[in-house]
Image: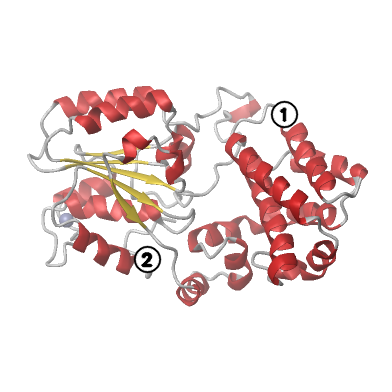
Amino acid sequence: MVFTDLLPWQESWWNEFRKDTRHLPHALVFYGPRGIGKVEFARYVGRALLCQNPNDLGRPCGVCAACGWIKAGNHPDYRLIRPEAIELAEGVESSESDGDGATLEAPVEPGAAESEGGKSKRAPSKEIRIQQIRQLADMLALGTHRGGRRVILIYPADAMNVFTANALLKMLEEPPESTVFILITDALDRLLPTILSRCQKVALAPPRPDVALAWLTGQGVADALRLLAEEGGAPLAALFAAQEDEVRRPQREALFGVLAKPEFASCLAVAERLSKCESALVVGWIQRWVYDCLGYRLAGRIRYYPSQKSAIATLAGSLDVTRALAYARTLVAENRLVDHPLNARLFVENLLLGYCLALQKI
Ligand SMILES: [Zn+2]
């Protein structure tokens, strides 16, 4: 599902944005936690900047020709630069109108590009390719079609490798007239400092828990409180998790079984099963679990998995904090490699064996 209006917590983002950008810079970077609607907000801002008839508060009218073109995915002065994998998940042509583009900040299914009949072709790129930026240069060489602004959204901006980022940097150094770049990222620290230095940074904060809960419940999510906790208070991530829950729950429960009673043999069996799951998801589950073990040990608090309290409390009781922290750090490092595990089963096996070692249960 696509949200074309501001979500409740984005109203304050919008008010801040309007205040801060009376003199609109040519490049912005929106950053904040994953799953809170940064891309949706950037799209709204893009519509507002291109709308021919914005209201007194600068909001897009939704009915002018420019709004119509964006909705239809063919505004000549509006571009979405995103990895092919996200493009496929969101719908290639449409920027706003397709009904199934809910995966804006959500993980992309592995194998999404497999052709029919099971014969796989090249996997869709999870990086923004340098060609995408080069094609942008061709577009920027021309004046805007409408003689007005041009808006380019780049997300996730951390999906650019150093060559791609440098190609973009050249454009940011000599910004074309009337062009606004909006970069969006969950991980500001993964952007090149040279890029960052040319962007105005806009921090987008997660909603208050009560606002997030009310909204999620309004979306018809039954288990909103649990899902919000598990997704660190990020409502869109929680909504995505709700949609995925039925598929994922058995896999996650199997993982929890091993995490609660870490043993070498069960690790191997579960790794086989979890290898069919997206690796980023598995790393995320383990990270949250370890975070909860540490949180319970150090502060008596469980943030993500309150439903697993008894298992977490038992583990926390005998936890070697130093080892657990070291393991948590390796998970962060793994999380950065997670898009490219050469062998998913081995990858998960290593994670789980590392977990067993960290908890001294081998
Ligand atoms: Zn309009």
The answer to whether any part of residue 253 appears in the image is: yes
CA neighbours of label 2 inside 10 A, class few (<14), some (14 to 19), many (20+): some
Tell whether 350 sits left or right of 7.
Answer: right
Residue under label 1, please give it.
343
- Frontmost of labels 2 and 1 is 1
As drawn, the residue found furthest toward the left would be: 147
Tell whether 173 sits left or right of 11.
Answer: left
Residue under label 2, please give it.
7
As drawn, the residue found furthest toward the front would be: 322
Amino acid type shown at disc 1: Asn
Quadrant for the C terminus in the image: top right
The answer to whether any part of residue 222 appears in the image is: no
* Picture layout, residue 324 above or below residue 307: above
Q: Of residues 172 and 214, which is closer to you in this image?
A: 172
- Please state the horizontal and vertical placement of residue 336, each as a whole percent of the image: 58, 38
- Please state the horizontal and vertical placement of residue 80, each as a whole percent of the image: 32, 39
Secondary structure under badge 2?
loop
Tell whether 338 sits left or right of 324.
Answer: left
Amino acid type shown at disc 2: Leu
